[in-house]
Image (cartoon, grey):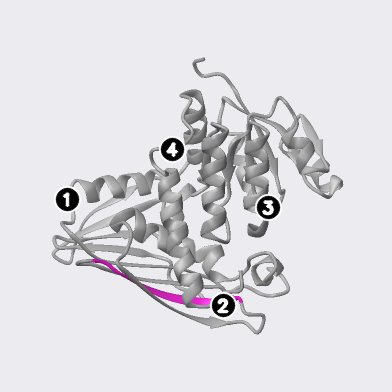
């Protein structure tokens, strides 16, 4: 078995797929076997750019390609569940872009399909695998900043309806919560676990998607204050604060190239931990490692982790009355 090449397929060839494919080229035992888009010209252009062996104008044809071992799904949110399940039914391993689905029920169906067909499935929460995040979690586990009492994290930028059509598209699962709100929620969850209570308020678009959402996650002895917006900017730093000090992740924190450690209000140390390529490389290596070891889930971002996060998002979706 050893370190053989793993053969990848990519469906949905937008911006994120391009960034992912450029990282795939950096991994020596990763091969881009096939790409698929409903627009064949796009598939041809993408395939040529990233040296794919085959290009398809249908997702089904890619799923039926016997050489493809693992499919990366990078289509809009509303199609994730259906495509992931279809790929798993065709015997493919799956890395599905986050959020894995627009409902908790669909998330459960996806995990069930992975287990039923005994194929690897992971939600593409790439931030979990970047070196700075791994290091921060290790420091927290080692008690470097004591018991965590407070997390502040946001993800915000000024989107425009003309340039970021998908973001504002209700049919495609647009809006702040599902596109970027999942990141601050992920940070709170990976550090503090599932909250006891959630409070969320949103400012809505006329089509009912959320333009900005603020969230408080209440724990036994801690709180997380989180925010997501597609209509305004923020500093995009994240702070994790404990009884002995705090950690500040460099902006933008979800792809942090490092962080600072503070104790007694004094900066004690700065750590620089750049990611390889755009940062997707680390989740790619995790997928390949799991497949080579016949694991159907990652220990770092497990099926249960995805379900827990999906449940948190579902609660917020219901509180702010999103139409999905």
What stretch of residues is rendered in magenta?
209-219
> Any magenta on residue 214?
yes
* Disc 3, SS: loop
Horizontal relation, residue 175 to residue 242: left or right: right
Taking 127 as reference, is 246 above or below it? below
Q: Residue at x 63, y 68 (%)?
A: 174
**Residue at the spot of label 1:** 143
**Residue picked out by circle 4:** 298
Label 4 with label 2: CB-CB less than 8 Å: no
Pick the residue in front: 172 or 113.
113
Which of the image's four quarters has the C terminus?
bottom right
Does residue 243 appear to the left or right of 292 in the view shown? left
Label 4 to label 3: alpha-carbon separation: 22 Å
Choose the circle earlier in sequence order: 2 or 3.
3
Q: Which residue is mark 3?
A: 75
Q: Tell me: 259 left or right of 256.
A: left
Q: State the image coordinates of residue 45 (x, y, percent, origin top left).
A: 81, 43
Q: Work out how far the residue at label 2 is from the one at label 3, CA to CA, in angstroms.
A: 21 Å
| Disc number lying in front (1 or 4) | 4
Upstream in the sequence, badge 1 or badge 2? 1
Q: Residue at x 45, y 52 (%)?
A: 307
Other-residue count near label 1 (Cα within 10 Å), few / some / many at <14 / 14–19 / ≥20: some
Q: Earlier in the sequence, mark 4 or mark 2?
A: 2
- Local crowd at mark 4 within 10 Å, few (<14), some, or many (≥20)? some
Q: Which mark is residue 211?
A: 2
State the CA–CA distance, disc 4 to disc 2.
33 Å
Mark 1–mark 3 Cα distance, whole angstroms, equals: 40 Å
Among the two numbered marks 1 and 4 on one chain, the one whose residue lies closer to the N terminus: 1
């Amino acid at each position: 078995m050893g370190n053989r090449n793993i053969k990848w397929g990519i469906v949905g060839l937008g911006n994120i797929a391009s960034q992912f494919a450029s990282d795939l080229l950096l991994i020596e035992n990763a091969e881009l076997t096939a790409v698929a888009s409903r627009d064949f010209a796009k598939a041809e252009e993408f395939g040529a750019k990233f040296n794919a062996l085959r290009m398809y104008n249908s997702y089904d044809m890619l799923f039926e390609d016997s050489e493809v071992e693992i499919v990366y799904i990078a289509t809009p949110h509303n199609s994730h569940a259906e495509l992931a399940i279809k790929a798993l039914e065709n015997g493919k391993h799956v890395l599905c872009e986050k959020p894995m689905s627009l409902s908790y029920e669909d998330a459960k169906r996806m995990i069930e399909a992975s287990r039923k067909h005994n194929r690897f499935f992971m939600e593409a929460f790439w931030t979990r695998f970047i070196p700075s995040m791994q290091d921060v979690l290790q420091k927290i586990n080692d008690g470097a900043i004591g018991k965590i009492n407070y997390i502040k994290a946001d993800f915000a930028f000024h989107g425009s309806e003309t340039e970021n059509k998908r973001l504002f598209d209700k049919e495609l699962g647009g809006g702040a919560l599902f596109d970027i709100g999942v990141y601050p929620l992920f940070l709170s969850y990976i550090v503090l676990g599932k909250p006891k209570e959630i409070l969320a308020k949103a400012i809505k678009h006329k089509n009912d998607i959320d333009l900005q959402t603020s969230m408080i996650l209440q724990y036994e002895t801690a709180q997380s204050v989180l925010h997501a917006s597609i209509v305004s900017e923020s500093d995009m730093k994240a702070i994790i604060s404990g009884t002995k000090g705090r950690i500040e992740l460099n902006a933008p924190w979800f792809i942090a190239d490092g962080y600072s450690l503070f104790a007694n209000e004094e900066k004690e140390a700065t750590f620089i931990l750049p990611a390889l390529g755009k940062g997707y490389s680390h989740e790619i290596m995790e997928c390949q490692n799991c497949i080579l070891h016949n694991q159907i889930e990652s220990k770092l971002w497990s099926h249960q982790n995805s379900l827990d996060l999906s449940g948190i998002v579902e609660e917020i979706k219901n509180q702010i009355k999103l139409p999905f």
